[in-house]
Amino acid sequence: MTSDHVSELLSPYIDGRVSAEEQERIGRHLETCAACRGDLAALHGVVGLLRSVPPTTAPVELRAAIRSRVEHAGVPSASGGLGPRLAAAWRPIAAAVAVVVIGVFAANLLGPQLPRRLSERRENGQSTSTVLQFEAAQDAAKKPSAANRAAVSQPTSPAAPAPSPDAAFRSVIRTARLGVEVERYDAAARHLLDIAEGAGGFIADSSYGEDEGRPRGEFILRVPAGRFGAAIKDVEAMGTVRQRQISAQDVTEEYVDLQARQRNLERHEQQLLTFMDRATKVQDLLAVEQELSRVRGQIEQITGRLRYLAHNVDMASITVVLSERPKKGHAGLWDLDGTLAKMQGAFLATVEQIFAAAERVLVLASTLLPVGALAGVAWTVFRRTRQSKAGA
Protein backbone atom coordinates (compact mmCIF):
# COMPACT_ATOMS: atom_id res chain seq x y z
CA MET A 1 0.00 0.00 0.00
CA THR A 2 1.22 3.50 -0.80
CA SER A 3 1.39 6.42 1.60
CA ASP A 4 -1.40 8.31 -0.20
CA HIS A 5 -3.69 5.28 -0.01
CA VAL A 6 -2.98 4.82 3.69
CA SER A 7 -3.58 8.54 4.35
CA GLU A 8 -7.05 8.22 2.81
CA LEU A 9 -7.83 5.19 5.00
CA LEU A 10 -6.60 6.62 8.33
CA SER A 11 -9.96 8.14 9.28
CA PRO A 12 -11.94 4.89 8.64
CA TYR A 13 -9.08 3.02 10.37
CA ILE A 14 -9.57 5.03 13.57
CA ASP A 15 -13.38 4.59 13.43
CA GLY A 16 -13.05 0.82 12.81
CA ARG A 17 -14.81 0.97 9.44
CA VAL A 18 -12.23 -1.09 7.49
CA SER A 19 -11.96 -4.83 7.07
CA ALA A 20 -9.63 -7.01 9.12
CA GLU A 21 -7.35 -7.56 6.13
CA GLU A 22 -7.01 -3.81 5.52
CA GLN A 23 -6.35 -3.19 9.23
CA GLU A 24 -3.51 -5.67 9.09
CA ARG A 25 -2.08 -4.11 5.93
CA ILE A 26 -2.33 -0.59 7.35
CA GLY A 27 -0.68 -1.73 10.60
CA ARG A 28 2.29 -3.22 8.70
CA HIS A 29 2.64 0.00 6.68
CA LEU A 30 2.57 2.18 9.82
CA GLU A 31 5.41 0.15 11.28
CA THR A 32 7.66 1.15 8.36
CA CYS A 33 6.39 4.67 7.49
CA ALA A 34 7.14 7.48 9.91
CA ALA A 35 5.11 10.08 7.97
CA CYS A 36 1.95 7.99 8.16
CA ARG A 37 2.55 7.41 11.88
CA GLY A 38 2.76 11.18 12.33
CA ASP A 39 -0.50 11.72 10.41
CA LEU A 40 -2.16 9.05 12.56
CA ALA A 41 -0.95 10.72 15.77
CA ALA A 42 -2.21 14.15 14.60
CA LEU A 43 -5.54 12.61 13.71
CA HIS A 44 -5.82 11.00 17.15
CA GLY A 45 -5.09 14.39 18.70
CA VAL A 46 -7.87 16.10 16.73
CA VAL A 47 -10.36 13.36 17.63
CA GLY A 48 -9.44 13.60 21.30
CA LEU A 49 -9.78 17.40 21.24
CA LEU A 50 -13.24 17.18 19.70
CA ARG A 51 -14.37 14.61 22.21
CA SER A 52 -13.12 16.76 25.13
CA VAL A 53 -15.31 19.74 24.15
CA PRO A 54 -18.53 19.68 26.25
CA PRO A 55 -21.83 19.78 24.33
CA THR A 56 -23.48 23.17 24.10
CA THR A 57 -27.00 24.21 23.16
CA ALA A 58 -28.10 27.16 21.09
CA PRO A 59 -29.28 30.20 23.07
CA VAL A 60 -33.02 30.50 23.64
CA GLU A 61 -33.08 33.89 21.89
CA LEU A 62 -31.49 32.42 18.74
CA ARG A 63 -33.96 29.52 18.58
CA ALA A 64 -36.91 31.89 19.11
CA ALA A 65 -35.65 34.18 16.34
CA ILE A 66 -35.25 31.25 13.92
CA ARG A 67 -38.75 29.93 14.74
CA SER A 68 -40.34 33.37 14.23
CA ARG A 69 -38.59 33.80 10.87
CA VAL A 70 -39.70 30.31 9.73
CA GLU A 71 -43.30 30.95 10.74
CA HIS A 72 -43.23 34.38 9.12
CA ALA A 73 -41.96 32.78 5.85
CA GLY A 74 -44.98 30.45 5.75
CA VAL A 75 -43.09 27.14 5.89
CA PRO A 76 -45.27 24.52 7.61
CA SER A 77 -43.84 22.94 10.72
CA ALA A 78 -43.78 19.23 11.46
CA SER A 79 -46.94 19.53 13.58
CA GLY A 80 -48.80 21.89 11.27
CA GLY A 81 -51.04 19.19 9.73
CA LEU A 82 -51.60 18.22 6.12
CA GLY A 83 -53.46 21.39 5.11
CA PRO A 84 -50.44 23.68 4.60
CA ARG A 85 -48.46 20.87 2.98
CA LEU A 86 -51.17 20.17 0.43
CA ALA A 87 -51.56 23.89 -0.24
CA ALA A 88 -47.83 24.21 -0.85
CA ALA A 89 -47.74 21.12 -3.09
CA TRP A 90 -50.81 22.14 -5.14
CA ARG A 91 -49.06 24.97 -6.99
CA PRO A 92 -46.33 22.88 -8.70
CA ILE A 93 -48.89 20.16 -9.53
CA ALA A 94 -51.21 22.71 -11.15
CA ALA A 95 -48.29 24.20 -13.07
CA ALA A 96 -47.22 20.75 -14.30
CA VAL A 97 -50.78 19.93 -15.46
CA ALA A 98 -50.99 23.26 -17.28
CA VAL A 99 -47.66 22.63 -19.00
CA VAL A 100 -48.78 19.15 -20.10
CA VAL A 101 -52.11 20.44 -21.49
CA ILE A 102 -50.40 23.29 -23.35
CA GLY A 103 -47.79 20.88 -24.74
CA VAL A 104 -50.43 18.43 -26.00
CA PHE A 105 -52.41 21.26 -27.59
CA ALA A 106 -49.30 22.60 -29.31
CA ALA A 107 -48.35 19.12 -30.54
CA ASN A 108 -51.84 18.56 -31.99
CA LEU A 109 -51.79 21.99 -33.62
CA LEU A 110 -48.30 21.71 -35.06
CA GLY A 111 -48.49 18.02 -35.96
CA PRO A 112 -49.67 18.62 -39.56
CA GLN A 113 -46.85 21.17 -39.97
CA LEU A 114 -44.06 18.55 -39.76
CA PRO A 115 -41.42 18.68 -42.47
CA ARG A 116 -42.94 17.26 -45.63
CA ARG A 117 -39.89 15.16 -46.42
CA LEU A 118 -40.07 13.39 -43.06
CA SER A 119 -43.80 12.67 -43.37
CA GLU A 120 -43.40 11.45 -46.94
CA ARG A 121 -40.59 9.12 -45.86
CA ARG A 122 -42.77 7.67 -43.10
CA GLU A 123 -45.76 7.28 -45.41
CA ASN A 124 -43.64 5.63 -48.09
CA GLY A 125 -42.32 3.11 -45.59
CA GLN A 126 -45.84 2.30 -44.41
CA SER A 127 -47.09 2.07 -47.97
CA THR A 128 -44.36 -0.46 -48.79
CA SER A 129 -45.39 -2.64 -45.87
CA THR A 130 -49.00 -2.32 -46.98
CA VAL A 131 -48.12 -3.53 -50.48
CA LEU A 132 -46.27 -6.51 -49.00
CA GLN A 133 -49.31 -7.35 -46.90
CA PHE A 134 -51.52 -7.06 -49.98
CA GLU A 135 -49.30 -9.49 -51.91
CA ALA A 136 -49.20 -11.95 -48.98
CA ALA A 137 -52.99 -11.89 -48.74
CA GLN A 138 -53.33 -12.45 -52.49
CA ASP A 139 -50.87 -15.37 -52.44
CA ALA A 140 -52.73 -16.97 -49.53
CA ALA A 141 -56.01 -16.59 -51.41
CA LYS A 142 -54.61 -18.09 -54.63
CA LYS A 143 -52.89 -21.11 -53.04
CA PRO A 144 -55.20 -24.12 -52.77
CA SER A 145 -55.55 -25.73 -49.41
CA ALA A 146 -54.50 -29.28 -48.61
CA ALA A 147 -58.14 -30.41 -48.55
CA ASN A 148 -58.75 -28.98 -52.02
CA ARG A 149 -55.60 -30.68 -53.40
CA ALA A 150 -56.73 -34.00 -51.94
CA ALA A 151 -60.18 -33.60 -53.49
CA VAL A 152 -58.64 -32.85 -56.89
CA SER A 153 -56.28 -35.82 -56.71
CA GLN A 154 -59.24 -38.18 -55.98
CA PRO A 155 -61.76 -37.60 -58.76
CA THR A 156 -63.75 -40.77 -58.04
CA SER A 157 -65.05 -39.42 -54.69
CA PRO A 158 -65.66 -35.66 -54.95
CA ALA A 159 -66.68 -33.95 -51.75
CA ALA A 160 -69.65 -31.60 -51.77
CA PRO A 161 -68.43 -28.00 -51.36
CA ALA A 162 -71.30 -26.99 -49.13
CA PRO A 163 -74.41 -28.50 -47.59
CA SER A 164 -77.51 -28.48 -49.77
CA PRO A 165 -79.73 -25.47 -49.11
CA ASP A 166 -83.17 -26.03 -47.71
CA ALA A 167 -86.25 -23.85 -47.90
CA ALA A 168 -84.98 -21.53 -45.15
CA PHE A 169 -81.52 -21.03 -46.70
CA ARG A 170 -80.84 -18.76 -49.65
CA SER A 171 -77.58 -18.77 -51.58
CA VAL A 172 -76.93 -15.11 -52.39
CA ILE A 173 -73.84 -13.55 -53.96
CA ARG A 174 -73.39 -10.04 -52.54
CA THR A 175 -71.35 -7.38 -54.31
CA ALA A 176 -70.87 -3.66 -53.77
CA ARG A 177 -69.01 -0.81 -55.44
CA LEU A 178 -68.18 2.32 -53.44
CA GLY A 179 -66.48 5.52 -54.47
CA VAL A 180 -65.00 7.33 -51.46
CA GLU A 181 -63.18 10.67 -51.37
CA VAL A 182 -60.67 10.92 -48.51
CA GLU A 183 -58.27 13.48 -47.10
CA ARG A 184 -55.12 11.32 -47.34
CA TYR A 185 -54.87 8.44 -49.76
CA ASP A 186 -52.04 6.54 -48.01
CA ALA A 187 -53.75 6.51 -44.62
CA ALA A 188 -57.04 5.43 -46.22
CA ALA A 189 -55.33 2.57 -48.09
CA ARG A 190 -53.83 1.30 -44.84
CA HIS A 191 -57.21 1.60 -43.14
CA LEU A 192 -58.82 -0.49 -45.89
CA LEU A 193 -56.41 -3.31 -45.12
CA ASP A 194 -57.34 -3.07 -41.41
CA ILE A 195 -61.05 -3.21 -42.30
CA ALA A 196 -60.62 -6.29 -44.50
CA GLU A 197 -58.50 -8.19 -41.98
CA GLY A 198 -60.68 -7.09 -39.06
CA ALA A 199 -63.73 -8.57 -40.81
CA GLY A 200 -61.91 -11.87 -41.37
CA GLY A 201 -61.23 -11.30 -45.08
CA PHE A 202 -58.48 -10.01 -47.33
CA ILE A 203 -57.76 -7.66 -50.24
CA ALA A 204 -57.94 -9.69 -53.44
CA ASP A 205 -56.65 -7.02 -55.84
CA SER A 206 -55.52 -3.40 -55.87
CA SER A 207 -54.43 -0.81 -58.40
CA TYR A 208 -53.01 2.71 -58.24
CA GLY A 209 -53.06 5.73 -60.51
CA GLU A 210 -53.26 9.51 -60.55
CA ASP A 211 -56.07 11.78 -61.67
CA GLU A 212 -54.94 15.39 -62.30
CA GLY A 213 -52.08 14.93 -59.85
CA ARG A 214 -54.29 13.39 -57.17
CA PRO A 215 -53.72 9.73 -56.14
CA ARG A 216 -56.49 7.33 -57.01
CA GLY A 217 -56.74 3.58 -56.43
CA GLU A 218 -59.15 0.70 -56.72
CA PHE A 219 -59.29 -2.11 -54.14
CA ILE A 220 -61.30 -5.34 -54.15
CA LEU A 221 -62.14 -6.53 -50.64
CA ARG A 222 -63.33 -10.08 -49.96
CA VAL A 223 -65.10 -10.33 -46.60
CA PRO A 224 -67.40 -12.97 -45.06
CA ALA A 225 -71.04 -12.53 -46.06
CA GLY A 226 -72.04 -12.03 -42.42
CA ARG A 227 -69.75 -8.97 -42.16
CA PHE A 228 -70.78 -7.46 -45.50
CA GLY A 229 -72.93 -4.65 -44.05
CA ALA A 230 -70.49 -3.79 -41.26
CA ALA A 231 -67.59 -3.60 -43.72
CA ILE A 232 -69.55 -1.24 -45.98
CA LYS A 233 -70.29 1.05 -43.02
CA ASP A 234 -66.61 1.12 -42.04
CA VAL A 235 -65.57 1.97 -45.61
CA GLU A 236 -68.17 4.75 -45.92
CA ALA A 237 -67.00 6.24 -42.61
CA MET A 238 -63.54 6.87 -44.10
CA GLY A 239 -64.60 9.92 -46.09
CA THR A 240 -67.23 11.34 -48.43
CA VAL A 241 -69.15 8.74 -50.43
CA ARG A 242 -69.34 9.76 -54.10
CA GLN A 243 -70.65 6.46 -55.50
CA ARG A 244 -72.61 3.58 -53.99
CA GLN A 245 -73.85 0.48 -55.80
CA ILE A 246 -74.95 -2.64 -53.90
CA SER A 247 -76.35 -5.73 -55.60
CA ALA A 248 -77.28 -9.30 -54.66
CA GLN A 249 -77.67 -12.31 -56.95
CA ASP A 250 -79.78 -15.23 -55.76
CA VAL A 251 -78.20 -18.48 -57.02
CA THR A 252 -80.23 -20.87 -54.88
CA GLU A 253 -82.04 -22.41 -57.84
CA GLU A 254 -78.84 -22.94 -59.81
CA TYR A 255 -77.14 -24.37 -56.71
CA VAL A 256 -79.91 -26.93 -56.11
CA ASP A 257 -80.07 -27.89 -59.78
CA LEU A 258 -76.31 -28.45 -59.97
CA GLN A 259 -76.33 -30.59 -56.85
CA ALA A 260 -79.16 -32.74 -58.25
CA ARG A 261 -77.30 -33.18 -61.55
CA GLN A 262 -74.14 -34.07 -59.65
CA ARG A 263 -75.90 -36.80 -57.67
CA ASN A 264 -77.48 -38.27 -60.82
CA LEU A 265 -74.16 -38.33 -62.65
CA GLU A 266 -72.44 -39.97 -59.70
CA ARG A 267 -75.08 -42.73 -59.65
CA HIS A 268 -74.67 -43.16 -63.40
CA GLU A 269 -70.90 -43.40 -62.89
CA GLN A 270 -71.34 -46.19 -60.35
CA GLN A 271 -73.52 -48.09 -62.83
CA LEU A 272 -70.88 -47.70 -65.56
CA LEU A 273 -68.22 -49.01 -63.19
CA THR A 274 -70.41 -52.05 -62.57
CA PHE A 275 -70.86 -52.59 -66.31
CA MET A 276 -67.11 -52.32 -66.80
CA ASP A 277 -66.54 -55.13 -64.31
CA ARG A 278 -69.05 -57.32 -66.17
CA ALA A 279 -67.88 -56.55 -69.73
CA THR A 280 -66.29 -59.49 -71.54
CA LYS A 281 -65.65 -58.01 -74.98
CA VAL A 282 -63.06 -55.38 -75.79
CA GLN A 283 -65.57 -53.35 -77.83
CA ASP A 284 -68.00 -53.19 -74.89
CA LEU A 285 -65.17 -52.30 -72.54
CA LEU A 286 -64.04 -49.39 -74.75
CA ALA A 287 -67.61 -48.08 -75.07
CA VAL A 288 -68.13 -48.14 -71.29
CA GLU A 289 -64.79 -46.46 -70.70
CA GLN A 290 -65.65 -43.67 -73.17
CA GLU A 291 -69.01 -43.07 -71.49
CA LEU A 292 -67.36 -43.15 -68.08
CA SER A 293 -64.85 -40.50 -69.17
CA ARG A 294 -67.66 -38.25 -70.45
CA VAL A 295 -69.62 -38.60 -67.18
CA ARG A 296 -66.51 -37.91 -65.11
CA GLY A 297 -65.85 -34.73 -67.11
CA GLN A 298 -69.37 -33.48 -66.43
CA ILE A 299 -69.04 -34.27 -62.73
CA GLU A 300 -65.77 -32.29 -62.52
CA GLN A 301 -67.33 -29.35 -64.37
CA ILE A 302 -70.35 -29.27 -62.03
CA THR A 303 -68.10 -29.66 -58.97
CA GLY A 304 -66.00 -26.68 -60.06
CA ARG A 305 -69.09 -24.56 -60.62
CA LEU A 306 -70.46 -25.50 -57.18
CA ARG A 307 -67.18 -24.54 -55.55
CA TYR A 308 -67.17 -21.22 -57.35
CA LEU A 309 -70.72 -20.45 -56.23
CA ALA A 310 -70.02 -21.56 -52.66
CA HIS A 311 -66.92 -19.35 -52.45
CA ASN A 312 -68.74 -16.30 -53.79
CA VAL A 313 -71.70 -16.91 -51.49
CA ASP A 314 -69.48 -17.21 -48.41
CA MET A 315 -67.15 -14.30 -49.31
CA ALA A 316 -68.82 -11.09 -50.46
CA SER A 317 -66.97 -8.71 -52.76
CA ILE A 318 -66.61 -4.96 -52.15
CA THR A 319 -64.91 -2.81 -54.76
CA VAL A 320 -63.65 0.47 -53.29
CA VAL A 321 -62.47 3.35 -55.45
CA LEU A 322 -60.38 5.74 -53.32
CA SER A 323 -59.57 9.26 -54.44
CA GLU A 324 -57.86 12.04 -52.54
CA ARG A 325 -59.83 15.20 -51.99
CA PRO A 326 -58.43 18.16 -53.98
CA LYS A 327 -56.58 20.80 -52.03
CA LYS A 328 -58.55 24.02 -51.58
CA GLY A 329 -56.70 27.18 -52.56
CA HIS A 330 -57.10 30.43 -50.68
CA ALA A 331 -56.74 34.05 -51.60
CA GLY A 332 -54.59 36.45 -49.63
CA LEU A 333 -51.66 36.01 -47.30
CA TRP A 334 -53.51 34.15 -44.55
CA ASP A 335 -56.09 31.36 -44.77
CA LEU A 336 -58.19 32.21 -41.71
CA ASP A 337 -60.66 29.37 -42.22
CA GLY A 338 -57.87 26.82 -42.49
CA THR A 339 -56.20 28.15 -39.34
CA LEU A 340 -59.47 28.02 -37.39
CA ALA A 341 -60.08 24.48 -38.61
CA LYS A 342 -56.61 23.38 -37.48
CA MET A 343 -57.10 25.04 -34.08
CA GLN A 344 -60.47 23.34 -33.70
CA GLY A 345 -58.98 19.95 -34.55
CA ALA A 346 -56.09 20.47 -32.13
CA PHE A 347 -58.47 21.57 -29.36
CA LEU A 348 -60.75 18.57 -29.84
CA ALA A 349 -57.77 16.19 -29.97
CA THR A 350 -56.42 17.66 -26.70
CA VAL A 351 -59.82 17.30 -25.01
CA GLU A 352 -60.05 13.68 -26.17
CA GLN A 353 -56.58 12.94 -24.78
CA ILE A 354 -57.47 14.58 -21.46
CA PHE A 355 -60.64 12.50 -21.19
CA ALA A 356 -58.68 9.35 -22.10
CA ALA A 357 -56.11 10.10 -19.38
CA ALA A 358 -58.89 10.77 -16.85
CA GLU A 359 -60.51 7.48 -17.82
CA ARG A 360 -57.25 5.61 -17.25
CA VAL A 361 -56.83 7.28 -13.85
CA LEU A 362 -60.38 6.33 -12.83
CA VAL A 363 -59.84 2.75 -13.94
CA LEU A 364 -56.58 2.59 -11.96
CA ALA A 365 -58.29 4.11 -8.90
CA SER A 366 -61.13 1.59 -9.11
CA THR A 367 -58.54 -1.18 -9.33
CA LEU A 368 -56.67 0.00 -6.23
CA LEU A 369 -59.82 0.85 -4.21
CA PRO A 370 -60.36 -2.69 -2.80
CA VAL A 371 -56.68 -2.93 -1.88
CA GLY A 372 -56.86 0.43 -0.11
CA ALA A 373 -59.99 -0.60 1.76
CA LEU A 374 -58.34 -3.81 2.96
CA ALA A 375 -55.23 -1.88 3.99
CA GLY A 376 -57.39 0.61 5.96
CA VAL A 377 -59.19 -2.20 7.79
CA ALA A 378 -55.89 -3.91 8.59
CA TRP A 379 -54.41 -0.64 9.89
CA THR A 380 -57.48 0.04 12.07
CA VAL A 381 -57.32 -3.45 13.59
CA PHE A 382 -53.57 -3.04 14.19
CA ARG A 383 -54.01 0.33 15.95
CA ARG A 384 -56.82 -0.92 18.17
CA THR A 385 -54.82 -4.01 19.10
CA ARG A 386 -51.81 -1.88 20.01
CA GLN A 387 -53.94 0.55 22.04
CA SER A 388 -55.57 -2.30 23.93
CA LYS A 389 -52.15 -3.76 24.77
CA ALA A 390 -50.90 -0.35 25.89
CA GLY A 391 -53.95 0.12 28.12
CA ALA A 392 -53.48 -3.29 29.66
Image: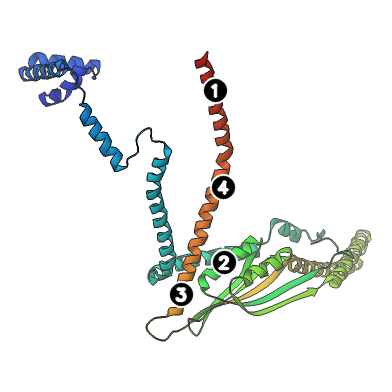
Residue drawn at (42%, 80%) of the image = 335
Q: Which residue is mark 3?
A: 340
Q: Looking at the picture, how far across and down is residue 147, in whole percent?
A: 73, 56
Q: Are marks 3 and 4 in contact (CB under 8 Å)?
A: no
Q: Are marks 2 and 3 in contact (CB under 8 Å)?
A: no
Distance Cα–Cα, label 2 vs label 1: 61 Å
Q: Secondary structure at mark 1?
A: helix
Residue drawn at (8%, 15%) of the image = 32
Q: Quadrant of residue 64?
A: top left
Residue 316: in sight, yes or no?
Answer: yes
Q: Quadrant of the N terminus?
A: top left
Decide: few, some or many residues near mark 1? Use Cα within 10 Å; few <14, some 14-19, many ≥20: few
Mark sitting earlier along the chain (2/1): 2
Mark sitting earlier along the chain (1/3): 3
Q: Look at the picture and state if 58 lies above or below 286.
A: above
Residue drawn at (27%, 36%) of the image = 68
Q: Quadrant of residue 302?
A: bottom right
Q: Secondary structure at mark 4?
A: helix
Q: Are marks 1 and 4 in contact (CB under 8 Å)?
A: no
Distance Cα–Cα, label 2 vs label 3: 27 Å
Q: Is residue 108 left or right of residue 293?
A: left
Decide: few, some or many residues near mark 2? Use Cα within 10 Å; few <14, some 14-19, many ≥20: some
Q: Looking at the picture, how far across and down is residue 295, in whole percent?
A: 86, 68
Q: Which residue is mark 2?
A: 191
Distance Cα–Cα, label 3 vs label 4: 34 Å
Distance Cα–Cα, label 2 vs label 4: 29 Å
Amino acid type at circle 1 is Arg
Amino acid type at circle 3 is Leu
Q: Is residue 369 left or right of residue 341?
A: right
Q: Looking at the picture, how far across and down is residue 205, in whole percent?
A: 61, 71
Q: Which residue is mark 1?
A: 384
